[in-house]
Image: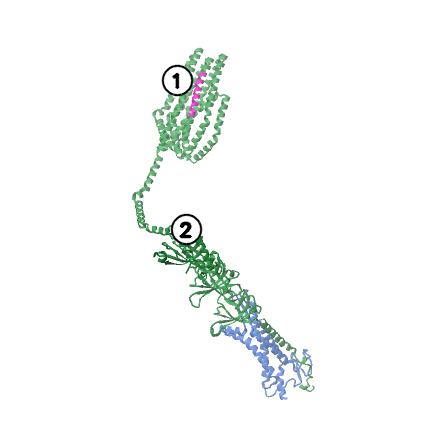
Chain colours: A green, B blue
Amino acid sequence: MTAIPSPEQLPPRRPIWQRISPVWLVPIAAVAIALTVAWNNYNSRGPLIVISFENASGIEAGSTALRYRDVVVGTVEDVRFGPALRTVNVSVRLEPGVAPFVDEEAQFWVIRPQIDARGVQGLDTVLSGVYIEGAWDTVPGTQSYRFQGLEAEPVARSDRGGITVRLSSIDGDGLSQGAPILYRGIEVGRVGQPRLSEDGLRVVADAFVEAPHDALVTTATRFWNVSGFRFTLGPQGAELDVASMAALLSGGISFDTIVNNGQAIRNGQLFQLYDAEAAARSSLFSGALAARAARISMIFEGEVSGLAAGATVELGGVEIGRIAAVSGLIDPERFGNSEVRLLATAEINPQRLGISGGDAIQRTYNLLGQEVARGQRARLGVASILTGALKVSIGESDAPLDRPFDPNAAPYPEFPTERYEASGAGLSAEQLLERVASLPVEEIVDEVLSILENTDEFLGDPALQDLPEQAVAILAALRELAEAEEIQAIPGRIDASLAALQTATGEAETLLLSLNEAEAAAALTRALDAAALAADSLPDFLLELDRLAQDLRALPLNEAVTSATAALNGIEAVVTDPAIQAIPADVGRALDAAVAALEDARGAIGTLTEAQAFEALAAALIEAETLTRNAAAASVDLPAIAAGVETTVTAAAAIPFDDLSAEAEAILDDVRALTSAEAVQTLPARLEAAAASLDAVLGEANALIGALDGEALGQDASAALKSLRAAAADVEAATPGLAAIVASAEEVRFAEIGRLLEQIAVDIAAVTSAPATQSLPDDLAALLGRLDATAAAAEETMESLDGPALASALQSALADLSTLAGDLSTAAAGTPALIARIDAIAAEKIGRAHV
Amino acid sequence: MARAEPLITARAAGLVGCRRCTRVWPATTETCARCGEPLVSRDPRSLQRVWAWWIAGVIAYIPANLSPMLSTRTLTAHHEETIVGGVIELALHGSWEIALIILIASVAIPVGKFVAIAFLALSLGSTRFSEHGRHQLYHVVEFIGRWSMIDVFVVAILSALVQLGAVVSVNPGVAALTFALSVIFTMLSAQSFDPRLIYDAPEKARA
């Protein structure tokens, strides 16, 4: 161990960089950093400005921002009271960049959430809290660090161009904070906070008109209130004025520059706010401009009422001024009597006459003097019929000029006038009102009241109350009538008539068929041509039929079918009668007999002289041809008939078929009853007997033919055919009658036919129910029996005859036949007359029905 | 411990102890043969380092108290709190315990450490204070230094957890960083202190 080293024995002092610890760098660096940061902070700090507010609601130190155009340019650092607690001083640290611009002109106000008539503002501040908005222009100015804060956004923001005017109003109407300033409906500015003037007599508000519209405001500008809506009743009549909705809610101010010679105004120029546009415009003739108006006086004679201050003065229809004052004037010296005359003082606006400049008034007087010299006079006219207000119009007049126009007269030059006659429309409104007032209104009301009472009584009459019931009873009676059996039976009767018609048609058809047997091809062709003609009119007919079918489809056919079925059953019963069954056998026998007769005839013909036979046959053929020609001629009329039928069908389509079907049902019932009648039931048996008789007759005819002399036969046939031709001719003649019937049927109003048919049906019913008719089958049977007997007798006779005797007998028989045909012809000739009669009867019925 | 007899320092006994592995060597030994630590009987620049770290810690401690520690941004407001401001706010809300904890951890302890270290460093040349007491103070300071970080931890945890987008967000302020630096510098300062120096002055006085 060596000696303990003493401190003196410590190694010699080392250089300072070895003795000093490098750790010292740490605090040095810390100090350096701190200094740097502090310097930077200080350097980047803008100036602190102090804004004084009335209160600091919502402003918080450290967080409330100052914004300029919505960019944060500063932060509130401190909020404290000003001296004597008068204000709240808000210290705001500005961004250094904007600091130079925040000069003396800068304005500050607090943005808070706000809802008013113009909408919602500052909505974002609900969440973020209020902020301070600043406005300053873009030109750096004198630095300032103390500002007076505004309560709300200023009307005249210093960062926007424009001009501020002061509006003064007596009652402050329309002067509300933020109210829009409109120029022809366009918002060009706003009204600021209204306040009382120093003397407390008026309400004054700053109003800001934004650039570039500020150029519209000159010394000649007039402002008026457009808040809400305004209803005026003046010399110009009634007027309703509604401004914009916003103006309706928050008020508004409109302005216009009425004349063009206004001069530019300075900031803060005071303007009067007028209550209405009319007042604002007319103010140009008084007030500031009144000094520049040329005043004239006018003395009106006559009874003048309705002229008041403010009435217009027109020259050639153009308003050049206003009546400023109206007063009475008594001047016995001038007028020679003590009548009161109307003295009106008018202010003529030289600018309205296109006169401006320093000597405008004098030039106006000169102009008016020239007008007077030209014969112009002032006269009173009606400005408003409604109010009876008057106006003054200057126009040509032949009124004498009692005193020349003196431009220098005192106090004002007098303009000559025309005597006022209170007439025409001026008083008419008044007279009208008087007349209305004199109307006996009370009496009229009394009359009306009594009429109403009477009406009330009438309506309350029990008899009137019963009226509906009676109407119902009438309707019921009508219904009963309609349901009466007679009415119901009408269709059945019609049906019976139709059946008869059908029978007739069937007979005609048979006739035609028989004609056909003797037909010639040419005749047939002609007939076909005629039929073709008829067919041409068929399509329309078919259309009608179609409609008819549609109507029919709607009919309650089921019942009709049931009835028809019953009828058919009856017919079937008839058909299945053994007697009917036996008919074919009888017919067969008759045919056999006919064959035999033909055989005989052949033999007889063989014995005939050929020439005679041929001549007779030729004549017969000629007759036949004539006959067919007649038939053709008859058929020519068919188209017309068809057309008639078509029309009829058209009319028939209108028939209430519902009812008819019921009637048809009834008819079918009748038919059934008829068919089930005993007489009908026995008809087949009788038919059989008749057929047997016919058989016998044919057999005899057969024998007779065998004995016939050909010539005589031919002549007789010819005669018979002639008769037939006559009959056909008669048929032909009958056709026009048919056509006429159809035509008249067309005219029939089918609604009325019902009644007629009813009568007819009643008649027919009477006929059918007549004992004679009932016994018809029996008679028919008796007839057939007689026929049978006759045939049998003939047969016997024939058998007993020899050839020549037979021939003569045959001749006489044929002559009888010919006679028979002649009778038929006669009967047929009577048909047209019959038809005509029917026609006449129908026409008569129709006429009666019409009656 | 008996105070009757003054202590003999290792240097007076011609020895030097290793500060890492505590092995005692003859005073002339340069390097600890056991752990390789350079052996110095007294660190001549200890006090310099103490003071350097101490100053850096104090410098860092100033912004740590002036700047906001927590920056809270909610939907409607932006809030920043300094340490003392937060303590006052907590106290006003009635959370006395938490306010007290934060006050002790963030204010009392760091300030106490500054005072304690300065006292230790300044009292080296004096014999008025007991060497043993100062040594114990030194140990307390060294032990307690790490607990000063509690405030920084709170801020770190809050910032990590409370990030609800636009609704609420918590961010550390400048103070969090400077406070952490201050604590670190103070700890380094305490570490730089060579407690053996405490015993030099009485020895010199006796000599």
Which of the image's four quarters has the N terminus of chain A? Answer: bottom right
Bounds of the magenta segment: A718-736
Badge 2: chain ID: A
> Is the residue A468 above or below the residue B102 in the image?
above
Are marks 1 and 2 in one subunit? yes
Tag 2 or tag 1, which sits nearer the N-term?
Answer: 2
Q: Disc 2 designates what residue? A: A398
In terms of image quadrants, where is residue A670?
top left
In terms of image quadrants, where is residue B180?
bottom right
Please give the count of numbered marks on the rendered protein: 2
Residue A28 is a magenta residue: no
Q: Disc 1 designates what residue? A: A789
- Mark carried by residue A604: none
Badge 1: chain ID: A
Q: Is disc 1 placed on a helix, strand or loop?
A: helix
Residue A729 is a magenta residue: yes
Q: Does residue A575 appear anywhere in the picture?
A: no
The amino acid sitting under disc 1 is Ala
> Is the residue A283 above or below the residue A720 in the image?
below
Q: In front of the other: label 1 or label 2?
A: 2
